[in-house]
């Protein structure tokens, strides 16, 4: 069975119909120093209707060690763009927590790619097969389109379970679980080692993952197991990612996580210790900004994002209410798009934010600034501008 460690995605950012014989001798977007050409890769692919080519590394002599990545190949001829653009050409990003095209991780990957960064992703092991096969089958092609019309390339998908730091931490029942059995090297330490082996270094690290098994229980009813599991998956996972990836991050690099206002204000329904986990994540952002700044010269920030109808948020059960609440009460009465969070992340990752570290950046249409819910009937006689939805 194909796994993320032995499959790599080589995306060609142009429709297959434009693939000409003249181009057949040109190297592919993800270039190999060997004489393998787009034509050979295309011929060896099982997929003809999508823009992703797959090559089984185990069954071919191809090795990542001999691969010239897009970031490496572009970095020699990076020329300044006019204006004050977010320019991430020549940078490489690892985004942990992408398993479909609905969440913040995907949107951040797209914005980073639009700014020119090379994209690697870490996908939760149980979600890996479906994500990879959807990618291969072209299910995400529409949402891979970047502002310039090209398609986002994902150079490699790594299996990841951020709850485990090293292979020694993995319990036997998880090792034996059939959802894990087909993959290998998915603990945080091993993924960082694989990225180092494949690409040498990264510039941007994104943590876009969370899990709280008892999220729908009030904190007052949450078990110790549920509380600690939420902290482990949603907060310590970031400490662990930084611990293992910071040594392979280039100086001037940036890391970003995603938090939620429930860390500092009461949001009924966001239970199971998830509010505590986000509070820890925000506090850790400050301490890690100091420690990783001093030791590795990298920046650490978190984005407090407004509500988005992602897979994880739908599982909590009240996301539509939160979206409605925001549009009734936030200073900006519009639905937040994932792209707005992606663009803020691209800014934070860019040299334009070179003096910003240890911060919580709110990307929530301003909802965090409100002290009251203005849709309350008690305000009915107050002259509050309403209905300016766009
Ligand atoms: N959706 C919202 O309304 C909202 C608001 C504010 C903050 N956030 C935060 O944004 C981040 C991304 O969430 P999202 O809402 O975009 O949903 P999402 O479902 O797109 O992302 C969550 C990801 O976490 C992954 N994951 C879960 N456990 C994991 C583990 N042990 N190891 C590796 N990956 C694991 C899932 O597979 C999934 O891909 C989370 O930190 C979330 O708390 C979301």
Image (cartoon, rainbow, N blue to C red):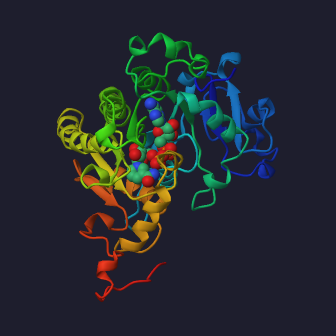
Please, is residue 78 above or below residue 334 in the view?
A: above
In percent of the image, x 58 and y 57: which residue is there? 146
Image quarter in which the N terminus is found: top right
Question: Would you say 78 lies left or right of 291 here?
Answer: right
Residue 34, image x and y in percent? Answer: 65, 26
Is 283 situated left or right of 181 in this image?
A: left
Where is residue 194? Give x, y as percent. 47, 23
| Up/down of 214 relative to 196, above or below | below
Q: Quadrant of residue 54?
A: top right
- Total labels drawn: 0
Q: Quadrant of residue 87?
A: bottom left
Give the quarter of the image for residue 248.
Answer: top left
Compared across the picture, whether 73 is left or right of 137 comes to left
- The one of 343 and 262 positioned closer to us in this rendering: 262
Can residue 62 be seen here? yes
Residue beneath the point at 58% across and 44% down = 100
Residue drawn 56% across and 29% down? 126
Residue 239 % position (x, y): 29, 32
Please, is residue 212 above or below residue 336 in the view? Answer: above
> In terms of image quarters, where does ligand 1 lie?
top left
Q: Give coordinates of residue 268: x percent, y percent.
A: 34, 53
């Amino acid at each position: 069975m194909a796994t993320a460690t032995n499959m790599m995605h080589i995306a060609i950012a142009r429709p297959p119909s434009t693939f000409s014989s003249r181009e057949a001798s040109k190297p592919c977007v993800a270039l190999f120093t060997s004489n393998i050409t787009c034509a050979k890769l295309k011929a060896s692919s099982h997929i003809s209707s999508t823009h992703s080519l797959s090559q089984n590394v185990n069954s071919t002599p191809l090795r990542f060690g001999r691969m010239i990545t897009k970031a490496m190949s572009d970095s020699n001829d990076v020329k300044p763009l006019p204006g004050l653009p977010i320019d991430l050409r020549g940078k490489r990003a690892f985004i942990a927590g992408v398993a479909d095209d609905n969440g913040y991780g995907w949107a951040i990957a797209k914005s980073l790619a639009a700014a020119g960064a090379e994209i690697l992703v870490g996908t939760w092991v149980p979600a890996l097969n479906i994500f990879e096969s959807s990618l291969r089958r072209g299910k995400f092609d529409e949402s891979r389109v970047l502002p310039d019309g090209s398609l986002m390339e994902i150079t490699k998908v790594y299996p990841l379970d951020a709850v485990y730091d090293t292979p020694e931490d993995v319990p036997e029942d998880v090792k034996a679980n059939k959802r894990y059995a087909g993959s290998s090297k998915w603990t945080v330490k091993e993924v960082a080692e694989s990225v180092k082996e494949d690409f040498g270094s990264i510039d941007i690290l994104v943590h876009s993952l969370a899990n709280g098994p008892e999220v729908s229980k009030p904190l007052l009813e949450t078990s110790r197991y549920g509380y600690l599991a939420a902290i482990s998956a949603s907060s310590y996972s970031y400490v662990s990612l930084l611990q293992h990836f910071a040594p392979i991050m280039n100086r001037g690099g940036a890391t970003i996580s995603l938090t939620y206002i429930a860390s500092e204000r009461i949001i009924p329904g966001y239970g199971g210790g998830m509010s505590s986990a986000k509070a820890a994540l925000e506090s850790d952002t400050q301490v890690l900004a100091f420690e990783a700044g001093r030791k590795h010269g990298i920046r650490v920030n978190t984005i407090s994002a407004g509500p988005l109808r992602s897979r994880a948020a739908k599982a909590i059960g009240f996301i539509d209410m939160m979206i409605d609440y925001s549009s009734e009460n936030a200073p900006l009465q519009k639905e937040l798009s994932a792209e707005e969070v992606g663009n803020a992340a691209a800014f934070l990752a860019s040299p334009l934010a070179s003096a910003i570290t240890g911060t919580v950046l709110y990307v929530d249409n301003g909802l965090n600034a409100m002290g009251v819910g203005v849709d309350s009937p008690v305000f009915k006689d107050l002259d509050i501008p309403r209905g300016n939805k766009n």
